[in-house]
Image (cartoon, coloured by chain):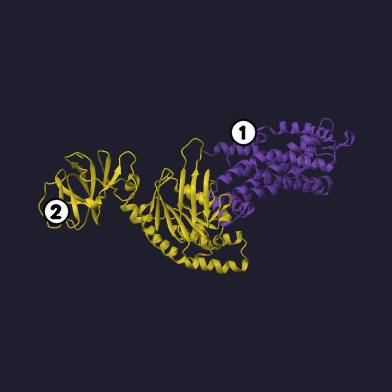
Amino acid sequence: MAIVETRNLTKVFKEGELGAVNNVNLVTEEGEFLVFLGPSGSGKTTLLRMIAGLETPTSGEILIGGRVVNQLSPRARRIAMVFQSYALYPHLTVYKNIAFPLKAQNVPKDQHRKKVEWAAGLLGIDKLLDRKPRELSGGERQRVALARAIVREPAVFLLDEPLSNLDAKLRASAREELERFHQSVGTTTIYVTHDQIEAMAMGDRIVVMNFGEVRQIGSAAEVYDDPADTFVATFLGSPPMNLVEQGDVIVGFRPEHFFPVTQLAGRAAVPEEIRVTDREGPFVSLRFRISHQEYLGAERLVYGTLEGGRSDGKKVVSRLSASHVAKYEMGSVHAFAVSEKHLKFFDRETQKRTQPRHDPWQ
Amino acid sequence: MFAPSVLYIALLIGVPFILAVLYAFSDARIGSTGFHYVGLENFRSILHSPSFRKALRNSIVFTLCAQAIVIVCSNILSIALEKPFRGRGFIRFLILLPWVAPVSLGTIGWKWILDSIYSVITWVLVALHLYKPYSAPMWLGEPHLAMASVILVHCWRLIPFSTVIMLAGRSAIPREIPEAAAIDGAGFWRTLFQINIPMMTPILSVAVLFGIIFTFTDMTVVYILTAGGPFDSTQTLPSLAFATGIAGSDLAAGAAISLFLVPVLVAVAYLMLRIAHRTEVT
């Protein structure tokens, strides 16, 4: 096990162009499951490939286990990587695929079978050892790739979108399996994904990236509830956080925190005043003109615009649980509310989080 | 739809082939209209002729050596030319030139380069004081040197073709696979011999088999450079067939010699079709 650290790590592919990775500083914890999350082109894969040694950094340092590894070849870094395409050797059987790292690192031959069987057993593929990769399903291939990665007990695991080639149903079970696998081996793992659900479900911490920069590092709850800027706020969550410009600030609130006033405890009537208070603390009430709804089974998404005040015409979304059965006519106006403690404020210039304001709606 | 190509094959390949078979069992000669069936007489006589046996051995040496050199060199070239660098396009173009140029013209150029009096190579060696002007090697005049020269010129001609095939084969390997091998701890040689080359096997065998056919049937290089000499030391089956049948006017013996090529070529063609079929299936 080892800690991976990057210091001012930068990668510029073409001179004069914007870097694919810019000045990234991060430190993993021992045995941590760290997720790089970002849209495509955010530099997360490039960052991972630099840590793996497949890409040479333009500047900055990479440390694995406290040692600068910039000059080391991938084989000397004691890492293992699972590729998005799995990169199994198509001409070798599963057994030989898993044994390849042992052979390449000159592990004595008499230990091969024991180690391969241990890795295959851990992933439940001991029955497939004589097959060729083309005879395996997507999920089985992914397990072979994982087995090949753990067989020589690396210091760090690097996983590059290993689930994105699986179908949705398989992905959920593979995710769970990966989590269990990480718990049992406890190796420091870096996982790259563009899927926020994967990131939030598996990551001990999430590194949110965009345009080659780290926007925020934190636990799933931190990046979701306390986004550092408007990018993080809108990249996480589906539908994303509602952002409403109010003078020099942008006010954000999650769709699930925006619901009809009638749901507030002890309030049946529609209040006309701006502020209501209930057990949850002060609320802000807003007039919401509904344009359309999407029924998604467990929940309902209600789309519309705000009415009146300075935020007139701003598009927002409300996410209501299935237990809320009230019907809404298209085009009708209702009073919706959001708790003040759920309001996030961002600077309009820098898009970064700022101090909460009172009365932003006046 | 197939009619034109069938006609073409029948006229240009079928008719000469049947003629060759007929001649091989006859006593046909240039300048005589007599035509008698003589059975296996021609085959018996060429099998007993030392120059035929020498030509057969030369053909095999020529093909094996040339193919070995071509495969190794084109592999190295394809590795060197795979990664982008400044001027790669231009170098690829230069490497392809020997294939584009007509064989005979290229070979005539080599004939001058290897000439006993005007050889550039000899001139350089003498200028470097490695040889005295009067004891310089006769590239095409000494049996072993002549064979080596013929092989090398033929390699020069085949390497571009083989390189292009290898480049295609290499670029068909997904980039992640050698990367995964690097992370798994494999160095350059292990990746080359245990990952890249095995993955290129189908296309590699196509290159080898084409090369064998081109080499085994080639007579341009031999004919222009040495005409089989000195003392038959570079005579191969096609050049011997030409020398006996056309130049020596013994059509029947020439036809019998060239028929010896058929079994080899049939075997190679069969292998080629099988490999092409196997790569299609997987």
Q: Is residue A128 above or below residue A306?
A: below
Q: Residue at x 54, y 66 (%)?
A: A116
Does dot 1 land on a helix, a strand or a loop? helix
Chain A takes which shade in the image?
yellow
Within 10 Å of disc 2 (Cα), the crowding (few <14, some 14-19, many 20+) is some
Say which residue label 2 marks: A262
Picture disc at residue B241: none
Q: Which one is nearer the viewer's eye here, B239 or A11?
A: A11
Q: Is residue A14 left or right of residue A164?
A: right
- Regarding residue B136, the answer to whether it shows in the image is yes
Q: Residue at x 33, y 56 (%)?
A: A221
Q: Contact, CB < 8 Å: mark 2 with mark 1? A: no
User: Residue pushed farthest left?
Assistant: A269
Q: Is residue A291 above or below residue A217?
A: above
Q: Is residue A80 left or right of residue A317?
A: right
Query: Picture quarter containing residue B255?
Result: top right
Q: Amino acid at mark 2?
A: Thr
Say which residue label 1 marks: B90
- Chain letter of mark 2 equals A
Q: Is residue B192 left or right of residue A6?
A: right
- The CA span between labels 2 and 1 is 75 Å
Chain B takes which shade in the image?
purple
- Chain letter of mark 1 equals B
Q: Which one is nearer the viewer's eye here, A3 or B107?
A: A3
- Regarding residue B212, the answer to whether it shows in the image is no
Query: Percent x, y for residue A150?
Result: 51, 62
Q: Amino acid at mark 1?
A: Phe
Query: Percent x, y for residue B132?
Result: 88, 35
The C terminus of chain A lies in quadrant: top left
